[in-house]
Image (spheres, grey):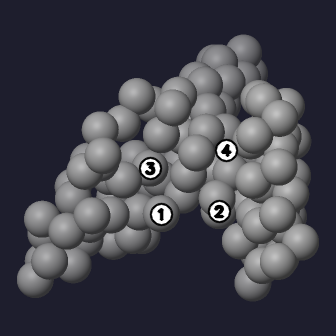
Amino acid sequence: MVSRTDRRAMKRVIAQMRGESPASREHVDRVLREEGFESAAQTAAYHCQRRVLTLRPWQCPPCWANDEIDPTQHDRFGNKADEVGLRQRLQRAGVSAFEPDPMRALADVEARSTQI
């Protein structure tokens, strides 16, 4: 079940990827057509997060990371402490793991909480 917060972030990340280039638009539109909204959002989030977080090929973006570390698989893609840790930070802050720019979203939440 996709939350309202996730659905809004999914729409934003798809729109962001569509606006990056004709090739990106074509790619995400094809995934949307052939595999559906959630798959297109996962594709777009993976693409946008890898770029904005400047991840190396062996590093997993928060949209694909596990919710908790499996101690039997601590060195696997999406299960490393820093990968799971970022996803957990997003969850604790009420931020979707599908945000196009997770660090900016966290900073925005932090800024709003200090204004109160």
Asked if residue 51 lies left or right of residue 44, the reply is: left
Residue displayed at 54% across by 40% down: 49
Name the residue beneath numbered marker 3: 61
**Disc count in the image?**
4
> In the image, residue 112 lies at what x, y percent?
72, 23
The answer to whether marks 1 and 2 mark residues whose Cβ atoms lie closer than 8 Å is yes
**Mark earlier in primary sequence (1, 2):** 2
93 or 49: nearer the eye? 49
3 or 114: nearer the eye? 3
Dot 4: few (<14), some (14–19), or many (≥20) neighbours within 10 Å? Answer: many
Residue displayed at 86% across by 57% down: 29
Q: What's the distance in space between the residues labelled 1 and 3, CA to CA?
A: 6 Å
Q: Quadrant of the N terminus?
A: bottom right
> In the image, residue 5 lies at what x, y percent?
79, 57
The answer to whether marks 3 and 2 mark residues whose Cβ atoms lie closer than 8 Å is no
Decide if residue 66 is in sight here: yes
- Residue 64 is labelled as 1
Viewer-nearest of discs 4 and 2: 2
Q: Secondary structure at mark 2?
A: helix
Asked if residue 113 lies left or right of residue 86, the reply is: right
Name the residue beneath numbered marker 4: 99
Q: What's the distance in space between the residues labelled 4 and 2, CA to CA?
A: 10 Å
Name the residue beneath numbered marker 2: 42
**Mark earlier in primary sequence (4, 2):** 2
The answer to whether marks 1 and 3 mark residues whose Cβ atoms lie closer than 8 Å is yes
30 or 50: nearer the eye? 30
Q: Amino acid at mark 2?
A: Gln
Q: What's the distance in space between the residues labelled 3 and 2, CA to CA?
A: 11 Å
Residue displayed at 41% across by 63% down: 65
58 or 75: nearer the eye? 58
